[in-house]
Image: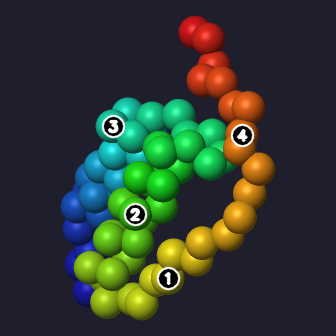
Amino acid sequence: MDIDHHRYVDQWLAHVRALAEEIGHRGPTTPEERRASEYCHEVLARLGLEPRIESFTSARSIFHQPLL
């Protein structure tokens, strides 16, 4: 059985880029954290899984994006 590993590597790199570059830093309780959660939910649902996003109450984060 021949498996096209390059196809899978390209797919996973696309997910890494989406999370790391498009959505970017995502501290707790930030809009970016929500976007990342929704992105992962969509990807897993397309794979035929039944992901759930569970809400919870949390104190507002004092997270600040790293200064580079």
In the rendered image, the vertical position of residue 23 relative to residue 43, given as above or below: above
Q: Which residue is drawn at 63% across and 19% down?
A: 66
Q: What residue type is labelled 1?
A: Arg
**Real-space CA distance between mark 4 and mark 2, rounded to the nearest whole angstrom:** 19 Å
The residue at which mark 2 appears reads as 38
User: Residue 33 location in percent, x, y?
Assistant: 53, 49
Give SS at disc 3. helix
- Give residue 47's quadrant in the image: bottom left
User: Residue 59 location in percent, x, y?
Assistant: 76, 50
Few, some or many residues within 10 Å of mark 2 (<14, 14–19, 20+): some
**Real-space CA distance between mark 2 and mark 1, rounded to the nearest whole angstrom:** 10 Å
The residue at which mark 4 appears reads as 61
Few, some or many residues within 10 Å of mark 3 (<14, 14–19, 20+): few
Is residue 9 at all visible to an observer of this figure?
no
- Give residue 49's quadrant in the image: bottom left
Q: Which callout, 1 or 3, points to the residue nearer the camera?
A: 1
Of label 1 and label 4, which has the lower sequence position? 1
Give SS at disc 4. loop
The residue at which mark 1 appears reads as 52
Q: What residue type is labelled 3?
A: Glu
